[in-house]
């Protein structure tokens, strides 16, 4: 089963499971949209329904090992929000989505909030307060945004995967950040581009090997069961 309601045009989180402060937003958010009318917003803020949850609850929800969010390298993750959905894919398919990281922290800040996506039990950072290219003020509730970006991830092995997206506060819980995601699709192997940003398989996110037919020739990031890093042609 492919990703359902990956563009949120149902207007709800139908087919997704959520934790923390998660909302369907429109262009009224001030960021515009990357695809049609509706998009998902995840924040590290409080909300009427309770808001962001503590790190351990996030890690349990996402089937992460305890402390994984700290081990991504930005410091002590404190609280946040996430969504997830389980789907099946074939080797050679490509997962693609649009994302936008927003923050009220300084850029950069030692309170290095970050957004991530992953295939449980693995996660990979999308952006943090040290990322380049922030656009300045343009959204209703946040002072900075990266703007919409698109990432594509080659799927190295046929299987059933649980896709996750999240955002966390780091160091304290006071100043909030958010992640917008939209346009989440799994494209069949016939539509593969040759420039996937990341690959993943049974060992997590990996480098170019072992999938030669559709593998990227310029993989820039990888993550495995015990490591995160950057490099080319690296298999964990
Ligand atoms: Ca949409
Ligand atoms: Ca923060
Ligand atoms: Ca917070």
Image: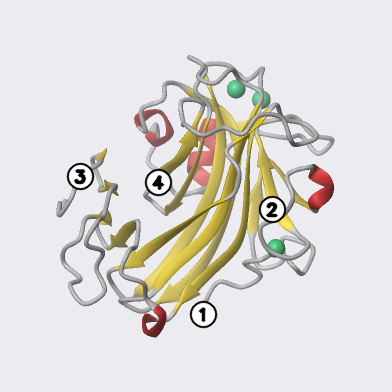
Q: Earlier in the sequence, mark 2 or mark 4?
A: 2
Q: Residue at x 49, y 22 (%)?
A: 112
Q: Earlier in the sequence, mark 3 or mark 1?
A: 1
For disc 4, the marked residue is 123
Relative to 136, 97 lies left or right:
left
Q: Earlier in the sequence, mark 4 or mark 1?
A: 1
Task: Estimate how packed mark 2 is, as few (under 14), some (14 to 19) or many (20 or more) residues with alpha carbons within 10 Å.
Answer: many
Image vertical order of residue 180 relative to residue 107, above or below: below
- In-front residue for pair 132/77: 132
Q: Residue at x 74, y 50 (%)?
A: 32
Q: Real-space Cα distance between discs 2 and 4?
A: 19 Å
Secondary structure at numbered mark 4: loop
- In-front residue for pair 148/21: 148
Relative to 2, 64 lies left or right:
left
Q: Real-space Cα distance between discs 1 and 2?
A: 21 Å
For disc 1, the marked residue is 1
Place residue 47 in its image quadrant: top right
Task: Estimate how packed mark 1 is, as few (under 14), some (14 to 19) or many (20 or more) residues with alpha carbons within 10 Å.
Answer: few
Place residue 92 in its image quadrant: bottom left
Image location (x, y in percent) of residue 82: 59, 46
Secondary structure at numbered mark 1: loop
Image location (x, y in percent) of residue 120: 42, 54
For disc 2, the marked residue is 40
The numbered disc on residue 231 is 3
């Amino acid at each position: 089963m492919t990703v359902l309601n990956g563009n949120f045009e149902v207007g709800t989180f139908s087919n997704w499971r959520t934790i923390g402060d998660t909302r369907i937003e429109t262009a009224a958010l001030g960021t515009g949209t990357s695809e049609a009318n509706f998009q998902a917003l995840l924040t590290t803020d409080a909300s009427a329904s309770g808001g962001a949850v503590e790190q351990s609850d996030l890690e349990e929800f996402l089937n992460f090992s305890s402390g994984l969010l700290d081990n991504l390298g930005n410091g002590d993750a404190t609280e946040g929000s996430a969504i997830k959905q389980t789907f099946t894919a074939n080797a050679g398919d490509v997962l693609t989505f649009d994302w936008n990281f927003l923050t009220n922290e300084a850029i950069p800040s030692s309170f290095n909030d970050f957004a991530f996506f992953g295939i449980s039990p693995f996660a990979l950072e999308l952006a943090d307060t040290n990322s380049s290219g922030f656009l300045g003020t343009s959204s209703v509730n946040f002072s900075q945004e990266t703007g919409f970006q698109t990432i594509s991830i080659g799927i190295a092995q046929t299987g059933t995967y649980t896709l996750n997206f999240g955002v966390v506060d780091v160091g304290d819980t006071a100043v909030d950040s958010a992640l917008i995601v939209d346009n989440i699709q799994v494209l069949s192997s016939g539509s593969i581009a040759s420039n996937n940003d990341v690959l993943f398989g049974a060992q997590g996110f990996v480098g170019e090997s072992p999938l030669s037919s559709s593998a990227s020739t310029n993989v820039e990031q990888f993550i495995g069961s015990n490591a995160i890093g950057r490099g080319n042609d690296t298999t964990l």
